Amino acid sequence: MTRFDASRYPVRIAGEVPGFVDAEHLPSRLLPQTDRVTRLSLAAAKEALDDCGSDPDALPEYGAGVVTASSAGGFEFGQRELQALWSKGGQHVSAYQSFAWFYAVNTGQISIRHGLRGSSGVVVSEQAGGLDAIAHARRQIRKGATLMVTGGVDSALCPWGWAAHLAADELSRVTDPARAYLPFDAEASGHVVGEGGALFVLESDAAARARDARVYGAFTGYAATFDGPGTPAWATPPASPSPTPGCAPTTSTWSSPTRPAPAPPTAPRPRRSPPCSAPAACPSPRRSR
């Protein structure tokens, strides 16, 4: 960890984006009003749009939107302004604090910068957020949107964010970076927090073919479950969705095939446990990327 002095904390390993100089990727006017996570999001969105080759200005006014995921929002910005509030007084708190800390700010800033005025949103679902965001974006494509910028970005490498991660008691405390994160390994001891993410451009299959877009992949199905601590909620894992016949890949990201026929109704899943009456004691969902 180099973003702040973590020597007093029990966990001092994190994934950082090296060599990313904010001022090299954003105009100076945006720097005072954005957190690190938003700067990473804006840089990723620009790269995705530049790579896909589609001009948002040439699309219908409400034809393009944004759906992003972030589990924390602008924690570093928020911590700095709270420190100013308690140490100097309210007159020293930035007006940008009103939105820079919010987990939806990435969607808003991307939308403003690129003029994406179509249906947009934000997803907060921990580790699965990026996948859930892409699924929500596909829903907008099926409703008629021409193009969606979507994916997930996070960065909460500051004392406030670190304290929140430590409170869950799920971080790896191994001091060797090469052994700290060992998913699906007998010696796994927790996860390692990182910053960064990935944003994509999603288009319908027809729209991508019409402009002869460069193809990276096809979005052919999606499903979500809830796994709490202990055994998964599903006694038998659901089958993987079958590829949609005739689906072809798309543009700089994924294509969304024509909506398939609705699946027949299924019986509701049995509840694993009674409703929680004390929200503070409820465990958070844990889903794998």
Image (cartoon, rainbow, N blue to C red):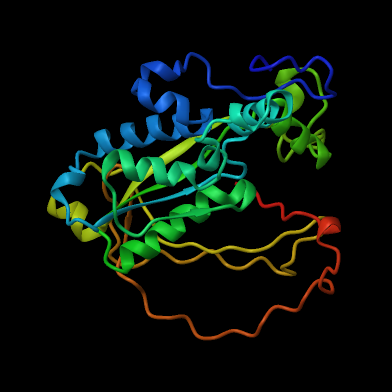
Q: Is residue 280 visible?
A: yes
106 or 132, which is in the foreground?
Answer: 106
Q: Is residue 19 above or below residue 198?
A: above
Position of 132 compared to 4: left or right? Answer: left
Q: How many marks?
A: 0
For the point 75% across and 26% down, the residue is 180
Instruction: Classify residue 237 by image quadrant.
Output: bottom right
The N terminus appears in which quarter of the rendering? top right
269 or 26, which is in the foreground?
Answer: 26
Q: Is residue 155 above or below residue 132?
A: above
Percent x, y for residue 88?
Answer: 69, 23
For the point 43% across and 81% down, the residue is 262
Percent x, y for residue 40?
Answer: 46, 30
Position of 246 compared to 73: left or right? Answer: left
Instruction: Classify residue 26 by image quadrant.
Output: top left
For the point 61% across and 53% down, the residue is 125
